[in-house]
Each structure stands twice: as C-alpha cells, then as structure tokens.
Amino acid sequence: MGITEIISNIRFLMLPVIIIIGVEFLLIALYYFYRRRQLDKKQIPIKKLILGAIFVGYIVFVLELTIIGRGTSHYMQMNLQPFSGYIDAWKKYSLRDLQNCLFNILMFVPLGILLPLLIAKFKEFKWLLLVVVGATVTIETYQTLTGAGIFELDDLMNNSLGGIFGYQLYRLAASITHNKKVKMKSLIGNLAIPLLMGLIFLCMNIVYAQKEFGHLAINAYTKSNMSDVKVSTSLELSSASTVAPVYKKIIKNENVEDLLQQKLGLSQVNTQDDKGSGEILVEDKDGVPYTLTKNDAEGQWWLTDNNYTPEQTSVTVQEEKAKSLMDKLSILPQDAEFTVQENGEFEWKLPDRPHLKRDYWTGDIELGLKQDGRVYSLAYSLHENQFIREVDILSPVVVYERIKKGEFPQIKYNALVQEEDLVIKKGDQIEIESIELSHMYDTKGFYQPIYNVSGKFNGNDWFTLIQARK
C-alpha cells in the first residue's frame, strides 16, 4: 500500500472519528452550560474534558484500524520472528514494506502522550508501559482468535515503541514547560528513539550503497519448517559449478514531448505531473485531444486519443502505414519481431535474451492507427539491458538441497490460493519437476540470474524462485 492509498484510507476512517469528537464537544458545551447554573458544584476542568474527547476519538480510530470491519482470512496464525518486517523491508529494500512498521509505531504515539495528560498515575513510566503492552496484546490476541489478523511479535514491539516515544514527547514538553527553556540533555534523551532509528537507517543506506548489486524481493522470506515434509524429484541434477550473466537496466529518458511535436505535430496543452510520472494533455493541429501518460522511472509512455473508438480497418493497407510511421518516429533501436494483433493494432517486440552476454534491448511498442493513418494509440515500453559481467551461480543440486531445508519463498501460484494454503505443514509433499535458469531485476536495476523451480505441492501446480548468484 502506497502513501497515497494510506492517506486516502485515513481520510475515510477519520470521518466517524470527527463526528464522535464533534458530538463530545457539543456535550461538553451543554455540560458547562448546565454547571454554570449550579454554582455550588465543582466543575471538571475544561482541559481534561477536551483531552478526554480527543482520547475517545483516538481509541475509535485505533479500533477502526485494528478490529472494526476487518475480514477473517487468517485463523490462529502467528509470526513470532522478531524484526521480520524490517528484515523483509531490507531484503526488498522497499519503502512500501517499511511503511507498515513505521505506521504501527506512529499509531501508538498518541497513547503515550494522552495517558499522562489525562491520568496522573501514568506519568510513571511503568504504568504507561503496562497499558501500552496490554492494549497491543489484547488487539493481537483478538485478531488471532477471530481470524482478523496475525499475531505478530513485530506489532507488539512497534506499538510498544510508539507508546514509549509518545511518552518521551510528553516528558520533553513537560520539561520545556517547567524550565521555560529547552535543555539539550532532555532534548536528546527524549528524542532517543527517532535519533537511534535515523542512525540505523543511515547506516543501512551506507551499507546498501556500498553493495555492487541490489536486493531481490524473493529473498524476503521466513524459513519453512520441513520436518516430516517429503521432497522428491526424478531429475538428474548437476553439481557442477557454472556462471551466468548479470545485466543493468538502462533507461533512456528521451524528451517524448519534443518527439511527438516534431514527428506527429502534437502540441502540449497542460501537465499533471507526479514525481516524473504524470499525464500531459496534448492536441494535434486539428485540435484533437490526446493524453500522454509517462513513467519516467521505467522509461515508459503511452499516447491515447481521448475520444476515438477503434474501428475495423484493412490490415494490409494499415500495415504499410504503421511501418512507415515507425520509421518516421525512429524509436526502434534495432530490428524487432513485427506482429498484427487480433484487435488490429501493431506490435514490435524485442524478446528478452539474457543468454547473449552482450548489451541488448528488450520490450515492445504497440501502435493503433485510424482509417486515415493517424495515430489513436501508441505505447512505448523498451529499455536496454547492459551486460555487466558473469557471476558464479549455484548448481541445481544446491538449489534442490535448499528446497529440502525450507530456504525458499512460498509464492502465491494461483489467484484462488489462500495465504494459509502456502504454509508448509507436516505431511506435505513437494515434487520438483523442473529447475530452470531465469533472470529478475533487483532493487538497483540489475538483471540477476535466478532459478525457477516448479513442480507439484500436494498434487497442485507449484513454483518458487531462488537467487542463483552465490
């Protein structure tokens, strides 16, 4: 889940929270109106009432995130491996995977701030920690028993860390209020958690930058327990050491707008850019609107006529027009496989050829033409694989041994397969039918060799991917 999606979900969940807090503020106003007429009665301080209202809204928000409206796809599942979320994020070098860990920390920060402000007893750290840990254990246990989630040790650690950080922020604010100034010792001490995490992330980035190659997402897995699991194969596996090539993905970020202006006469109208990947409205000399969608990170772009509906045309006539237009655009780096698709569009394809051990282009270009020969769709998805060097790789025998030891990721091999179906259990059977060399892009854009291992898992089609490079 990306940042945009998270923000969108939070906005949706915040609506009932805002309504509840609004109702509470209305009740507080009515309470003070009534109490003002009862002069002999002691009033509850307005500050505590407001904090209490915010606290109730916060509790509702947490319950929405963790309990209310969640599905029941996980039954009695637990992940007690410490730091597994951080390990997965590191192996994938993925901010998206790290987001979940950080969000679980931030979710409990308000609890560490609000509790000491509301109840004096929780100004003592031991009582606050007890509530934070107790609340997390309660949520995790409920999710496990109801199937709404998995009991994860990481969640317990992250939530507790968030509560402690919130308490430190409260202590820092209290120190500044009491001393009327910021003490460096108090500042450093109470910001120890984010400072420590920042230092860790800095060191991780330094280590990552020093590595020649990036990380492969398939390496982010928890080792399976293979006790009483039968693994077999009829293959004759080689134990000989061998090598395989590694390539680097090279993105050619050409100025697409200038190309379309010069070759097709399309001029830009406006831009909706989002960090290099956005939509640009362009039009031809007759004012026909097109949308140019770009993904600069991948070197891809798509041009589409906003109002045109494809029609059946003479393929023979259009084929010559398509080839002529492609020559005019000069965006094919070399000869490609030309095909006419069933929908009447044309495709030029450069197949993946990692066996060449030299630089090569791969990807495809798709073109759709109107009856008059003008473009109604053009999709560019080509990039260059630059040969780096050959690396030593594991032998098929070693790969098979890794399968037997449970050192492989369980990949969802079918859309109907549930996560619980992928958990290796006592009595399961895995039959290996093929171990083939393939390639996969890592987090630095290197095209690394991997093994595609396929066969049967309890009689069903199954496969997994294992890094081939030693």
Image (spheres, helix red, strand yellow):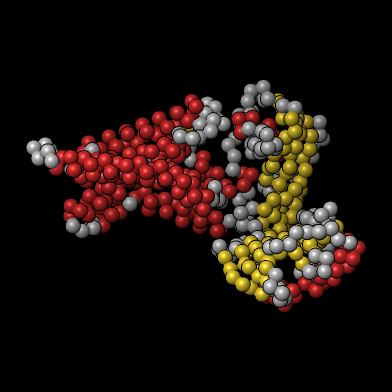
- Compared across the picture, whether 35 is left or right of 205 comes to left
Residue at 51% x, 40% y is 84
Name the spot of residue 398 as percent of width and height, x first: 71, 39
Pick out the residue farthest to the left.
40
Asked if residue 356 lies left or right of residue 224, the reply is: right
Query: In the rendered image, which quarter is residue 128 located in?
Result: top left
246 is higher (above) or lower (below) than 225: below
**How many marks can you see?**
0
In this view, the residue in front, 112 or 434, is 112
Asked if residue 77 shows in the view, the reply is no
Identify the residue at image location x=78%, y=62%: 367
Q: Looking at the picture, how far across and down is residue 121, in whole percent?
A: 22, 36
Q: Residue at x 37, y 45 (%)?
A: 18
Q: Quadrant of residue 231?
A: top right
Q: Position of residue 396 (x, y in %)?
A: 75, 40
Q: Is residue 264 left or right of residue 216?
A: right
Which residue shows up at 54% across the image and 30% down it?
A: 72
Measured from the top left, where is residue 465 in percent x and y? Answer: 69, 42
Q: Which of the pair 461/203 is nearer the observer?
A: 461
Residue 16 in view in this figure: yes
**136 left or right of 27?**
right
Is 150 rendered above or below residue 196? above
275 or 429: nearer the eye? 275
